[in-house]
Amino acid sequence: MGMTIAEKIIALAAGVEEVKAGDIHTVTLDRMMSNDGTTHLTVDMYHNKLKNPRIADPKKMVFIVDHNVPSDNPKTAAAQKKMRDFARENDIDFWEGKGVCHQIMMEHYVCPGELIFGADSHTCTYGALGAFGTGVGCTDLLYGMVTGTSWVLVPETVKFNLIGKLPKGVYPRDLMLTIIGHIGASGVSYQVMEFCGDGAGTLSVDDRMVLCNLAVEAGAKTAVFEADQIALDWLAARGRKPKAVFKSDEDAVYVKEYTFDLGKIQPVVARPDFVDDVVPAQEVCGTRIDEAFLGSCNNGRIDDLRVGASILRGRKVSDHVRFLVVPASQEVYLKALEEGLISVFMDSGAIVMNPNCSVCWGSCQGVIGENEVLISTGTRNFKGRAGHPSSKVYLGSAATVAASAVKGEICAADML
């Protein structure tokens, strides 16, 4: 029986020739990542719950401070210090102030064929490079940290056949929100979303990150693209080589298949308070906003900043809107500086922030108040996600967010 990409990665990590959906296997982990959301809890358990604490392989560990940067209160500062000290004492790679965890991992670590655990739900981003990345809790991360292994219940795989090419002015963000709107927020619960087809080949690695990153918002265990030449060239440019390059077998078993014509995708917006409440952007145009956010692990990359700057150039942010622009990493920030994008944003009246999770996380920068409305490229729009429980979060592409910041109300870019 043939295997999918995800099954082949699990089989390699388990040291077996074949796995199938429903099997449970012990696997050797290639990498583990933890951020400041829960690392302090992992450190506490390491010191207080283990009789003979040890780290199996510190070189497989990466700690990244990205959720509250700089720290916003003494409690946060103490948690980050605990993380910082532990990393130093145990020779763990440590990043602080350099960007969002998934962007850092993609820029510096992830390789095709790897099995990666991250203490963050959007670890599924790594499938953009043909890796199996999945989010786990801090207890599972601790077990992996001290043993180098874990167990995996092999998920079923759902095939998403992409055909055609996205029209001008339509972005991968619109595509993935459309998919989630179609299948629902639990449409692929504990399953793998495998993106394939000619349309997949038209997408850059950054584009693929958008799709894989949001897979968890449809309930997915992870998402994956084949590591084709586009991915391998991207990897080589960063001086890395794949662990393994897999392609699904022709007789691989898929529990379900969908086909999406990229040429028919249009700008969309997810309405509060559910990521699968997706409608054409035109349906919510005219909704007054108080804040706009361009950033996050989903849409804070250089392509997104280019799109946003192209809309802002020569225009001004509405006088009643706070527009936060937050590059996903220091690398992205520096590239935006070189291209003059940061000047465009600042000249327009936007607020350019340091690389971090910012208002997507909703606990420090840009928190919105009672009854306020945010249009965001963040990952989630749950009730209270970005501030007061009565506030509202709409999700859209970088183009829609930038256009809305100028208009002062939700606005599709082609209507500005």
Image: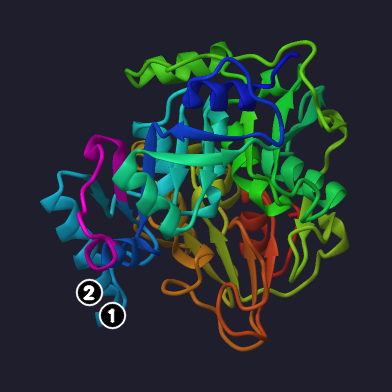
Q: Are marks 1 and 2 in contact (CB under 8 Å)?
A: yes
Task: Please state, as top left, top right, bottom left or bottom right, where the C terminus lies in the image.
Answer: bottom right
Q: Give the image's coloring scheme.
A: rainbow
Density class for disc 1 (Cα within 10 Å; few <14, some 14-19, many ≥20) is: few
Find numbered disc 1 in the image and state the secondary structure of the residue it sits on.
helix
Q: CA distance from mark 1 to mark 2?
A: 5 Å
Tag shown at residue 78: 2
Q: Residue furthest left?
A: 89
Question: Magenta includes 377?
Answer: no
Give left or right: position of 168 versus 292: right
Of residue 108 and residue 373, the one placed in the foreground of this image is 108
Asked if one can make out residue 330 in the rendered structure from this viewpoint, the answer is: no
Residue sitting at 38 percent across and 17 percent down?
A: 237
Task: Please state, as top left, top right, bottom left or bottom right, where the N terminus lies in the image.
Answer: top right
Residue sitting at 78 percent across and 49 percent down?
A: 180
Asked if one can make out residue 353 in the rendered structure from this viewpoint, the answer is: yes
Density class for disc 2 (Cα within 10 Å; few <14, some 14-19, many ≥20) is: few
Q: Amino acid at mark 1?
A: Lys
Compared to residue 358, the image places residue 98 above or below, namely: above
Image location of residue 254, percent across then percent down: 81, 27
Image location of residue 403, percent across then percent down: 66, 56
Q: Amino acid at mark 2?
A: Ala
Tag shown at residue 75: 1
Residue sitting at 53 percent across and 63 percent down?
A: 360
Of residue 240 and residue 339, the one placed in the foreground of this image is 240
Give left or right: position of 186 versus 57: right
| Region in magenta | 46-63
Image location of residue 320, percent across then percent down: 59, 78
Residue sitting at 64 percent across and 44 percent down?
A: 221
Image location of residue 410, percent across then percent down: 73, 64
Find numbered disc 2 in the image and state the secondary structure of the residue it sits on.
helix
Compared to residue 287, the image places residue 248 above or below, namely: above
